[in-house]
Amino acid sequence: CSITKRLIYPLVGGLIGIAVYLNLGLGSGIGSSNETQVATAETMTAAAKVEWADMMIVSGVVVGAATFLFRKVLFGKGKAIDAPAAHRAAEMAAAAVGSGMGPKSDYSEARDFVAKMRKAGKNVVVFYGSQTGTAEDFATRLGKDMQSGGVRPMVLDPESYDWQCLASLGEGELAVFVLATSGEGEPTDNMEAWFDALASDRESPEDSETPMFHQPEDKDDLDPEMPLSGVTYAVFGLGNNTYEQFNHHARVVDGRLRALGATRIGERGEGDDDVDIEEDFSKWKAATVPLIREYLGATDDDDQTQVPQPTWAVAEIDIDAAKVWTHGEMGDSGASEGTAAYSIHRPFVAPITAAADLTPSGDRYVLHVEVDLEGSGMRYEAGDHIGVFAANSDAEVDLMLHALGLQDRADAPISVRATDPFAAQQTLFPGAATTYRAAFRHYLDIAAPVPRSQIASLVLPHARSDAAREFLGQLAEDKDAHAAVVAAGCLTPARLLIAVQQAEAAAGVPESGRLVLPVAEAFELCQRMQARLYSISSSARVTPTRASITAVVLQYDAQTELASRLPLGARRCGVATNYLLAATNKLNLGPSDPEVSSAVDALKQPPILDSKDHVIRPYAVLPPTLPVFIRRSTFRLPADAATPIIMVGPGTGLAPMRAFVQERALLARENPEKAQGTSLLFFGARTSAHDFTYREELISLFDDIKKAAPESRVITAFSRDQQQKIYVQHRLAENAELVYRTLLCGKDKLNGPSRAHIYVCGDAKMMAKDVAKALVSLISEREGVSEDTASKWVSEMRRLSRYQEDVWS
């Protein structure tokens, strides 16, 4: 019956559709005019002239295409493709016949990365799957580090190229994949199409269908089962071991490539961001690059020692001031309103309509910020993320300009272009020109510590004094020294350069002999400014054109003596949250309140502290808007409101839970007679008096929900309100009977995974693991099964998307 539905029905439907098209669509066409109605007899006569041979040819193409797609079902291997896929196959086959083209009619030379490689004289393509920019940065650095006369790499974004061309890679060519894992084992957005093609069955990737790759003209017919035979690749994954699906993206891609016949060079690298991902990457690179060189036949005398050219060419130019981008303009400058959808590449400039500190009596800032999406065409659902592009503070920008000796030329117009004409990223910003100040404020992330490998490759070669070489050499060669000085002190590029200059001054090196880093290297030392993602804390059903952000402001002191001696002191400030804090303060200024203005020279001013002991960073450019985009998520409420939900969201992990609660409360108000499943919210914070965010709103919302689901409630855990610290996992255990009753969904026993849905948002390193353990223990005790059995049930809930996490470390 299943095979009949999945195979026979679509084929019959496809044949009927073609028959209708041929019998009614030819001749004068399917018209609705009176003329057509009058000429019925003529139309039927014309249709009768269609030869049955045409029908047989078309039907043969459809049947042949479907037979190939369903070969594993027909011949006993694999699983059937779903009916919609078969319908689409029939439509594509019919379209191919109608156009006189074969199955490769969708081929685009512009998206053929192999053709681009060969045209550019490259023999290695490095693809990055990146969500926050780290994988992109690793891929760029890898491409530069392996470059030599015999190894000619090209770094590309897979989103811009077709996976179907992968089979075209031949002998002496290589693909490298640098892949971050996103969310709960998901591929990154820019690898989504590639991942879905390679792993069509996400639940069981090993059972996935064989993708249909383009047939290369210079190869024999591809093996139907092993189409990637002869293709060679390497892979490095970026992950965090606090997540359930550690490096799942890279593992699945690696497994599927090998299953399809490709040959991997070296071991699969797995970076762990919870330990030292930079060191993991360095070790994998040191082991794998020599193997790549050997495979490509590179020799020691093929210019391996040649210094690679800088990534960017930076030049001061003479240009009309109106063409100089100084306010962080983003996206396609040539696109007019409505010509393209807003996205990470073209964010919507959204007005900030509301902003407030949710913990005014606390010692931290927890911000609530609302942006207006009216006119953007963007839609979101509860559980989605909003991406925000922020800017660096004036103090950080001034520090960078000072470290490079650019204070006097800070506002000079500059152009920034890639030195490689085939580089994936040709420009740093969309406009014709910007300034040094604007580049460091809007387009470059200047607040991250400098990796050890980049100290060695970008900074150390420019050291001119023994003092500089000694200072930098130790940091470049000794990972423990780097961890103690750079990582612990959060030495950003500017702070590192100034620390070297101070060491040179102490050693008596004259100014003329001290380290001066070229601007191009400084630009390369910094990643491109990346969007920060926040769980949307509002429901689109309640506020469809407004999206809310709930975020805690990050400030801390670096714990090293060197950090405290450098300009701006030891205080470190998160880029995005401090920008949001400044925007909140500006929006809430009273008529008589003085506005914090940008200091003439922020480096000479003492830090300005507010009542919460937070440093106030001034921003010369602080518009009442935010560049934003919506990122879809799988973190979703169940479609049926009768399904019970258990939400665990301590701190700002409350954000998506607030959206869920708003939605369930709205449903209860709209239809109070219709029963809902129980909604339990476990919320945790430091103290009830100072840190209970959205207290009154949550009480009101749950009053509404209780009318449709009487057992629904908020259960709180305030860790510092008593001598013994209490967290959300403790409250789960204390309320085990209620939680278990909610999991039962009206049954007497679970005897397997619950039909209820569980949502966890917040810290991945400790909280999420402790919550999972508490639930396993609770189920084990109530069901009378082993913890191993209960753990398997919870794992099955994860597989069925009934246990979802939106966590970070």
Image: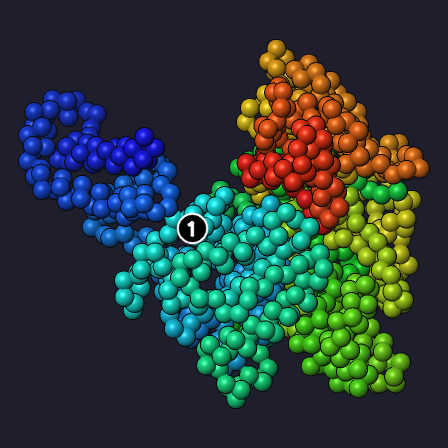
Residue 742 as seen in the image, left or right of residue 22: right
Q: Which amino acid does label 1 sit on?
A: Ala
Residue 419 shown left or right of residue 91 in the figure: right
The quarter holding residue 692 reads: top right
Instruction: Using the rendered view, name the quadrant where residue 534 is placed.
Output: top right
The residue lying furthest to the right in this view is: 723
Residue 182: x percent and y percent?
A: 59, 50
Q: Where does residue 490 sit, x and y in percent of width and height?
A: 79, 63
From the top left corner, tell me how far across and down residue 486 is, in percent.
78, 67
In terms of depth relative to the viewer, which is nearer, 710 or 352?
710
Does the image show residue 433? no
Residue 751 visible from this viewpoint:
yes
Residue drawn 84% across the image and 85% down it: 509
Q: Residue at x 72, y 31 (%)?
A: 781
Give the residue drawn at x 71%, y 18%.
711
Count neighbours of disc 1 (C-alpha within 10 A) and say few if under 14, some if 14 to 19, many if 20 or more.
some
- Residue labelled with disc 1: 197
User: Compared to 135, does 674 lie above or below?
Assistant: above
